[in-house]
Image (spheres, helix red, strand yellow):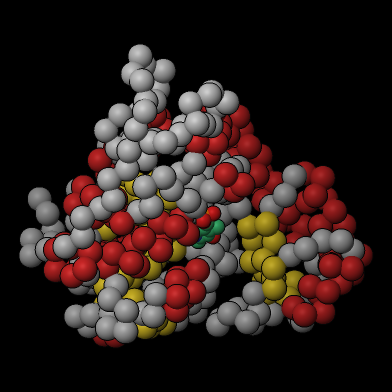
Amino acid sequence: MPIKKDFNIQSLIRENVKGLKPYSSARDEYVADGSQMVFLDANENPFENGVNRYPDPQQRRLKSVLMDRKAVPIENMLLGNGSDEVLDLIFRTFCEPKVDNIITLPPTYGMYKVLAAINHIENREILLTENFQPDVDKILERADENSKLLFLCSPNNPTGNSFSEKKMIQLLENFSGLVVIDEAYIDFSDGQSWSKKLKEYPNLIVTQTLSKAYGLAGIRLGICLASKAIISVLNKIKPPYNINELTQNHALKRLQSVSRIRLEIAEILHQKKMVIKVLKHIDFIEKVYPSDANFILVKVDDADVRYQQLLNKGIVTRNRSNQPLCENTLRFTIGTPEENIKLVMALKEIN
Ligand SMILES: *Cc1c(COP(=O)(O)O)cnc(C)c1O
């Protein structure tokens, strides 16, 4: 039973996008997949070299593997050149420049703000609470009829924690625009993906990525999971060949290594535990924040000084001090066992 009975996606789509007829690419109907067809439709060089043909604009082979892994039907799935492209498509589909607004919850992922600025959309920032949870009342209070998107990053970057399920449900049920749940770090967490709830919440968009747990940041592949209605309108405005052939092939190959990916995630989580143990014994580290991700946020005595000391030892971390509620914090990504040893040795030396 849909909870939002009155929800109408059409009322959220920009007028120009509603009326848009998408570019019809030469390969929309037929895909060069070794069949006996003769392809003289796209002005390609016919001599085979592995990438002389345009890629499948709908990435059907890749999506069918992802469908099995994510237990989400293909019609509820769109792929982007990184989740950053997916997020940009969402902005351009729903947010009318200089009219609409979005709501973000700092401290959080910096791209929402950048994309809002690029698309000339007001960004209403409602700080997370002291324990890095959404302030539901304040969010709903600041929202108006032009609030098209609410970004919930869970597990959140840079804080590392997941948001309370109850609060997220309150927001899904009461926010009148679309709720975008960014699950870039979901594979490191025990929590289950909100993509299981797409049927219940027609206003839900889930984004994921192969950049973090899947170890494919270099190929740029982001995943958008949403209702069929939302996916089909995003499809209208996406660049026809946004996922190149090399990316599709590489992702397909990597997705075969299910057990290897699982082992790597387990090792990263094990390493995280070990690193946290050491961090708790470093005097200048005042707080180690709980993490459901592959990084740890810590509060230190003086972040600028500690950042520079680590840099002098050849270790690059992220100083998050300029983010609200994150004064004097550093973010450490979990590396290989060798890299983590270097980090903890360096921390002990400068202690
Ligand atoms: C790293 C990250 C992404 C990444 O996106 P890609 O463009 O897919 O590499 C998205 N959201 C958050 C919160 C991230 O930390």
| Image side of residue 93 versus residue 109, left or right | left
| Image side of residue 37 versus residue 302, left or right | left
Residue 303 sits in which quadrant?
A: bottom right
Vertical placement of residue 95 versus 62, above or below? below
Vertical placement of residue 300 versus 71, above or below? below
Q: Nearer the viewer, residue 314 or 160?
A: 314
Tell which residue pokes out farthest to the right in this image: 349
Tell which residue pokes out farthest to the left in this image: 6
Residue 73 sits in which quadrant?
A: top left
Q: Residue at x 89, y 63 (%)?
A: 313
Q: Residue at x 27, y 33 (%)?
A: 29
| Image side of residue 156 versus residue 280, left or right | left
Q: Residue at x 38, y 52 (%)?
A: 239
Residue 99 sits in which quadrant?
A: bottom left
Q: How many numbered circles does the render carry?
A: 0
Q: Nearer the viewer, residue 328 or 203?
A: 203
Locate residue 240, reporting x and y percent: 36, 47
Q: Residue at x 21, y 55 (%)?
A: 21
Residue 131 visible in the picture: no
Tell which residue pokes out farthest to the top in this image: 36
Locate residue 273, reporting x and y percent: 67, 50
Locate residue 70, reporting x and y percent: 38, 38
| Image side of residue 350 versus residue 316, left or right | right
Q: Nearer the viewer, residue 12 or 51?
A: 51
Vertical placement of residue 9 versus 41, above or below? below
Residue 224 visible in the picture: yes
Locate residue 261, reporting x and y percent: 58, 34
The C terminus, quarter of image: bottom right
Q: Nearer the viewer, residue 302 or 273?
A: 302
